[in-house]
Image (spheres, rainbow, N blue to C red):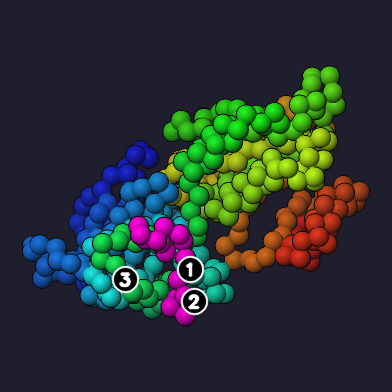
Amino acid sequence: HNGDCLLQEQRGERPTSSTRGALKNPFVGNVSKYVPLPPSEQRAGVKKGRLQFDACFESGNLGRADYVSDYEYDLFIRPDTCNPKFRVWFNFAVSNVRSEQRVIFNIVNFNKTKSLYRDGMSPLVMSTSRPKWQRIPSKSVFYYRCPDHGNNYVLSFAFAFDREEDIYYFSYCYPYTYSRLQQYLERVDALNLPYWKRELLSQSVQQRRLDVVTISSPHNLQTDSHQRMVFITARVHPGETPASYVCQGLIDFLLSSEPEAKVLRDNIVFKIVPMLNPDGVFLGNYRCSLMGFDLNRHWTEPSPWAHPTLHAAKELVMQYDRDPNISIDFYIDIHAHSTLTNGFMIGNLYEEEERLERQAIFPRLLSHTRPRLLHEENLFQ
């Protein structure tokens, strides 16, 4: 599968309103400045108010757009590359709008039945003149089973366009792109901090960087000193964008002048891999890599060919684990959840009681200091 097809215009016959609800033609690419039209206008010019859809940008995702009426469109998420069962993330642009135009967007091919959209979460919107993401009011958002679409769950939201010259962007959640991470890391590099080091650990299938950063006081990095280490990874699942915000927030704190941050730097070596799946993030996948692998299911035997970023990260962890001068106190992999609220931790279920109790200490302490991290919601399995 050629990942570059995601940046090309979708080719082939476009469905009309008569095929509403049926996904008869498979699609692997994103729509590119496509205007779905009623049959009566397909040979005429495109007039104002006939919406133009585009998802050919970094982390974009929209596989198909169907015209239903002047006030309604059915939208189809483009499945993860090489893995059609994952359809959750969307991120697309709309232009050629008419002032005060009101529409309903129906996202009709979610693969999940449960979603935080059932519990009050709402999609995000921004526009070129207002580049800050905002939530669409929850009263305008509906998540329900729809008989017209095989009784599958559909996300519908109503929206009123107000500025004709603007391009509007709609997203499942706050995007955090591969390019944004690279720009952030470059800004930190430019500070020349003595307790910061950024290295290229590996490259993805499409040759994107897999960065590993080290945060610690210089005296901890001497070869003859014993190192206590915390190893952190994030963004193995591309659609779990809050993981990147948490990871960046953690890095910002560890680099700060806060007294607690200095104590941590003086006593611990932090190794952080902020984006385990850069190809999946760039392509706008929800869960998988370019080749359709859920990388989080391949930790046992990652392939250097099929899962190069995962393979490199695991090799580094194992290298540190074998080093007698290093003790890895924690390995933390940061995720986000599509159906559960609040903050929580998921740990392993060990048969050895002492080992199980030891790993439960940190989540329990954290729940005492952070009220949004509820200990009773932590899972060990």
Q: Nearer the viewer, residue 208 or 313?
A: 208
Q: Which mark is residue 161?
A: 3
Q: Is residue 229 left or right of residue 139?
A: right
Q: Quadrant of residue 97?
A: bottom left
The residues tagged by marks 1 and 3 sit, at their Cα atoms, a distance apart of 15 Å
What kind of residue is marked 3?
Phe
What kind of residue is marked 2?
Ser
The residues tagged by marks 2 and 1 sit, at their Cα atoms, a distance apart of 8 Å
Report if residue 360 is visible in the image.
no
The residues tagged by marks 2 and 3 sit, at their Cα atoms, a distance apart of 17 Å
Image quadrant where one finds the N terminus: top left
Tag 3 secondary structure: loop
Q: Residues within 10 Å of mark 2 (few under 14, many from 20)?
A: some
Residue at (34%, 39%) from the top-left corner?
A: 4
Report if residue 305 is visible in the image.
yes
Q: Which mark is residue 138?
A: 2
Query: Are dots 2 and 1 in contact, CB under 8 Å?
Result: yes
Q: Is residue 221 left or right of residue 168?
A: right
Q: Residues within 10 Å of mark 1 (few under 14, many from 20)?
A: some
Report the residue that reaches farthest toward the bottom: 139
Boundaries of the magenta span: 125-141
Q: Which mark is residue 135?
A: 1
